[in-house]
Image (tube, rainbow, N blue to C red):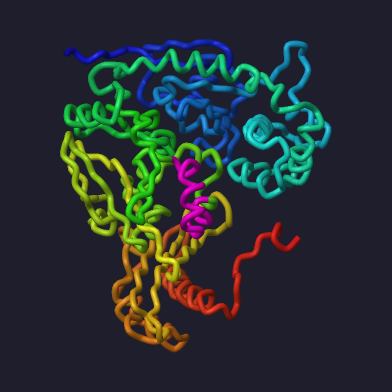
């Protein structure tokens, strides 16, 4: 039976159905909006997903439900939007010309000065308001982690966010009123066909299913696989790299499953940080804390745990804690699957145990035992939306006499790959869990790691921070000075 192939992408832009054949694999949504559609309310600030000036909402069907999320248009590729609803700030304009409640609140509470970043703030707050019409200050701040403003100092914006529902009700908003109709239009676009656009190397494909993805990668094993594009987007916007041909997998429902079996949480290779947050934060709270510090909300809505692993970065945030938990991967090539311990997946800088045409189908994360101690600490120059300088993850089991029965310690930013501190672990095993045991184990760090100096931290700082994180873990597990991290909302 011949495979059905469509040669164009289809999506909804604000209220209009769009069908496109002339799309380059590396064309961003931001460029399409500004250059091809003259929708210039979406701004280019950083072109790397940091400032939020380009924020738009993207709606997609998930389990039959239409879900809207804020995303960075500057690093979101146009080709990945097949079957989606893109909403820009222009769509907020009312038929009578009046401002949307979010916009009016920003005006009345003086939430804008130069105005460059304002459309991005409006769209982030719009997405939050649709989900939570009466959000707490903590939720407002979380929704705005990915939006930077150098003028207002944020307090006026937060006051505006608190007041939006006094200007209108979310259930009467057009996105709510028209949700069923939009969902129906998007469902009609899901025709079960593979999408192939372009020719030669200047082409991209969107597989119809996970099985179709496996077939595609056997046909084109050197293709760039793009899930959330939070890394690959920067390859294009910052490093001008050629990424063609491309396979977009963000819309594959078969890679977005989350389940639990035999004491492990199974995360599909295409599950975003936002989608994984509820389960992981509930079962392994330290992972919830970590996810909240990965990028801004736009990045967490786009980026995937599988992509963070497959990218192989030595400063990827999820590999160290997953290594400490003993996670494994399901890798697939064609119809053949194999299991690989996550710590063995990383071979050397830029080199992973992943053959051409093979992809991460699932991540298996064992939940810690009830009596285990588990913690993750991320070191950055600023608390939110910053790249890791060093990250430590600690998983500890004590026996009935308070001795170290098992220890798995892993770091990012300390070597060419995410790496276990095996010499440190060996120095702790069988010893009483005391401060002197910890101090005696610290020299073993020199055998495990030889960190480098770069723009984020010096080698000396990284080594000292890594050792201090073990000290912190000891102090927190013995309960003598806890907690070390207190937010202003907890002390208010």
Percent x, y for residue 23?
38, 17
- In terms of secondary structure, what is the magenta stretch mainly? helix
In the rendered image, which quarter is residue 52 located in? top right
Where residue 316 appears, as percent x and y from the top left, is 39, 52
Q: Name the quadrant of the C terminus.
A: bottom right
Q: Which residues are magenta?
A: 272-291
Q: Residue extending furthest right?
A: 108
Q: Nearer the viewer, residue 263 or 413?
A: 263
Q: Residue 282, image x and y in percent? A: 51, 53
Q: Where on the picture, by quarter, is residue 454? A: bottom left
Image point (38%, 45%), residue name = 259
Magenta-drawn stretch contains 99: no
Location of the N terminus (image quadrant):
top left
- Residue 114 % position (x, y): 73, 34
Name the residue rendered at 50%, 38% in the picture.
301
- Decide if residue 84 is on the left or right side of residue 442: right
Residue 456 as seen in the image, left or right of residue 53 = left
**Residue 143 to residue 321: above or below:** above
In the image, 86 versus 26, the foreground residue is 86
Would you say 196 lies left or right of 51 here? left
Residue in the image at 56% along x and 14% along y: 181
Instruction: Please identify the quarter of the rendering in which residue 163 is found.
Output: top right
Count of labels shown?
0
Left or right: 334 in relation to 425: left
125 versus 208 height, above or below: below
Work out whether residue 446 can be spotted: no
Q: Which residue appears farthest toward the bottom when viewing the image?
A: 436
Residue at figure coordinates x 52%, y 19% from the top left: 183
């Amino acid at each position: 039976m011949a495979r059905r192939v469509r040669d164009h992408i289809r999506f909804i832009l604000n209220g209009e159905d769009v069908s496109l054949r002339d799309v380059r694999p590396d064309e961003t949504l931001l460029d399409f909006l500004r250059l091809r559609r003259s929708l210039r309310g979406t701004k280019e600030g950083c072109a790397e997903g940091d400032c939020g000036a380009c924020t738009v909402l993207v709606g997609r069907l998930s389990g039959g439900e239409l879900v809207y999320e804020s995303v960075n248009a500057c690093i979101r590729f146009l080709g990945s939007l097949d079957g989606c609803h893109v909403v820009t700030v222009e769509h907020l304009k009312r038929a009578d010309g009046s401002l949307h409640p979010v916009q009016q609140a920003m005006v009345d509470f003086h939430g804008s000065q130069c105005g460059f970043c304002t459309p991005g703030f409006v769209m982030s707050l719009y997405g939050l308001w649709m989900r939570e019409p009466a959000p707490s200050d903590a939720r407002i701040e979380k929704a705005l982690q990915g939006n930077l403003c150098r003028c207002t100092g944020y307090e006026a914006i937060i006051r505006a966010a608190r007041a939006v529902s006094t200007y209108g009700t979310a259930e009467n908003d057009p996105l709510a009123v028209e949700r069923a109709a939009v969902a129906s239009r998007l469902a009609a676009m899901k025709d079960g066909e593979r999408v192939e656009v372009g020719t030669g190397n200047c082409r991209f494909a969107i597989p119809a299913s996970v099985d179709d993805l496996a077939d595609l990668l056997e046909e084109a094993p050197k293709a760039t696989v793009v899930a959330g594009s939070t890394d690959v987007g920067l390859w294009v916007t910052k490093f001008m790299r050629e990424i063609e041909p491309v396979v977009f997998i963000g819309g594959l429902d078969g890679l977005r499953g989350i389940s639990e079996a035999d004491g492990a949480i199974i995360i599909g290779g295409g599950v975003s940080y936002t989608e994984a947050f509820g389960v992981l934060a509930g079962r392994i709270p330290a992972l919830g804390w970590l996810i909240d510090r990965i990028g801004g909300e736009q990045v967490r809505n786009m980026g995937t745990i599988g992509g963070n692993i497959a990218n192989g970065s030595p400063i990827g945030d999820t590999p160290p804690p997953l290594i400490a938990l003993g996670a494994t991967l399901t890798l697939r090539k064609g119809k053949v699957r194999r299991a690989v311990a996550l710590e063995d997946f990383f071979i050397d800088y830029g080199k992973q145990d992943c053959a051409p045409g093979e992809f991460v189908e699932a991540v298996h994360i064992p939940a810690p035992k009830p009596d285990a101690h588990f913690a993750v600490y991320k070191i950055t120059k600023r608390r939110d939306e910053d790249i890791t300088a060093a990250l430590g993850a600690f998983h500890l089991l004590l026996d009935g006499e308070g001795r170290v029965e098992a220890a798995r310690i892993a770091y990012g930013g300390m070597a060419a790959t995410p790496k276990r501190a095996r010499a440190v672990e060996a120095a702790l095993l069988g010893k009483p869990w005391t401060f002197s045991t910890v101090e005696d184990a610290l020299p073993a760090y020199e055998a495990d790691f030889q960190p480098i100096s770069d723009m984020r931290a010096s080698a000396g700082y990284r080594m000292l921070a890594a050792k201090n994180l073990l000290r912190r873990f000891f102090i927190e597990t013995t309960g003598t000075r806890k907690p070390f991290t207190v937010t202003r909302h907890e002390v208010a």
